[in-house]
Image (cartoon, helix red, strand yellow):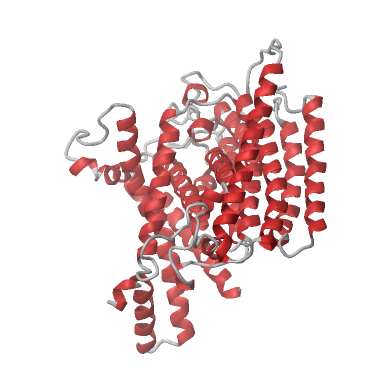
Amino acid sequence: MLGQFTFVGILLVVALLLSLFMVGAPWLLRPKRPNPRKSEPYECGLTPHGESWVQFKAQYYVFALVFVAFDVEAVFLLPWALAHNVMPFYAVLEGILFILLLFAALLYLWRKGGLEWM
Amino acid sequence: MDFISDAIVNIGLWLERLLVSAGLAPQAAALVMTIVGTVVVAFFPLLIVVFLIWMYRKASARIGGRLGPNSSGTWAGPGGIVQPIADVIKMFTKEDIRPLGIDPVPYNLAPIIVVASAVMVWAVVPFGKGPRMIGADLGIGLFYIMAFSSASLVAFLMAGWSSNNKYSTVSAFRATAQLLGYEIPQLVAVLCVVVVAGSLRMSAIVDAQQDVILLIALPLPALIFLLASYAEIGSRPFELLECESELVAGYQTEYSGMRWGMFYVGEFMGAVAVSALFATVFLGGWRGPFVDSFPVLGTLWLVLKILFMLLVWTFFQMTLPRLRIDQMLAFNWKFLVPLSLVLLCVLAPLNHWLVRALPGSDYVWARTGILLAANVLVFLGTWAVVAIAERRRTVRPRQVEVSA
């Protein structure tokens, strides 16, 4: 098992080195002549006004909240799906009950208008 | 002949023996071979990407009724085959413009993460028969792939947020909503595969398709997986992260030169990874004719299946219009998520019953047929529900607002 993760670890190093090389190597070849006009943020030719790190309304924060619930669900479902063949049938039904509970939460949110574009 | 029939494994064994006979300790030789293996695995997707860039252009030009790169400017080889090389040279020699006011650490890290995470996926893809043809046959293979393929979300968010550009920031917000949402149907579709194949291990999933490929047993999860994966890599029907007509180029607006090239390569690498995953999980991976007597053919079959899936991807890219952001989110949360959950609820008890009622490899076609029938029934049920909902829907005045 450790041997397999050795491969993953070495691959991570190789992948990072490869990406670093791809980003870094052009430094030797490319021209470097910045000027103030060139280094303005490109916003369709208009002069950029202020920073972009401002507070604005994210219309889909509810989706992010739903996602947390569903992602936790997925983590629980993974071992269930893996082991459902060796478990008794009621364990399979319990898993389905669990899915249906979250399904009810989704339906509730749907009826509340949480899935509408706000 | 024996050497050629399993050439890749035998070349590896020969190299390892050479190292040992040169005086290296067996453990050190094994470590060197592991490093060689990682380098091969890391460069394999890059090679496919170089070919894909050419293939994508040719196919999209054919679909669009254009010529494509066959004589762009000067000589570009037969059929424009050396065009990607010219692209690489251009990208390497282009000036790298860094805008004022960026956040340097995430700005510089994002392109690296995009490519590195796309390379990492390949660690668990089986290229052929046996333990030597797969980088690391992890017991959590599919889960590992899901984890690394969602790392691109972090990169998109970092790139968009750190660019100090309003359009890029909006793109980063969209990336969060889209990539988070589509992860769920993707994962649940994978769970359907896990239910039927009974393992998360990639080699076991390929072995489960010895007689019948899983696409026949699970066409609906395959479709859900394909659509969700295309959304995950932000390709055309779900291309809201970088739609040119709204957001300039989205999160990559402020990148130029090779940094932008990394996003370009990363996008193609994502497509290759998704195709490889689909080919492995649903199309039988390296399995194909004559693969038992000539194991080296396994890699060829896998590459051919990947290229076929890439053609499908190109077709999606070139023929489907872009969705609006609210349509895209609604399609996910109101259609794909419920459908995939219902599918899992149907398939899990059905398969639980099937492996007891019709066990063994004699009944594999019967099991496949019943699973296929269940898929068709769920599909017809979905069709009916959507038709009823469509009929009942009253037209409400839509709230008009500036979309973010």
Which residue is located at x 43 percent, y 57 percent?
A: A18
Q: Position of residue A77 (x, y in %)?
A: 73, 53
Which residue is located at x 46 percent, y 28 percent?
A: B320
Q: Is residue A2 above or below residue B323?
A: below
Snapshot quadrant of residue B300:
bottom left
Snapshot quadrant of residue B227:
top right
Q: Position of residue B203 (x, y in %)?
A: 53, 65
Which residue is located at x 41 percent, y 51 percent?
A: B305
In the rendered view of the protein, which quadrant contains the N terminus of chain B?
bottom left
> Which of the two residues, B124 or B299, is positioned nearer the viewer here?
B299
Q: Is residue B322 above or below residue B177?
A: above
Q: Position of residue B378 (x, y in %)?
A: 65, 39
Which residue is located at x 46 percent, y 58 percent?
A: B285
Q: Is residue A56 visible?
A: yes
Q: Is residue B351 left or right of residue A44?
A: right
Q: Is residue B258 visible?
A: no
> Which of the two residues, A4 or A82, is positioned nearer the viewer here?
A82
In the rendered view of the protein, which quadrant contains the C terminus of chain B?
top right
> Which of the two residues, A117 or B4, is positioned nearer the viewer here?
B4
Q: Position of residue A61 (x, y in %)?
A: 73, 32
Q: Is residue B362 left or right of residue A75?
A: left
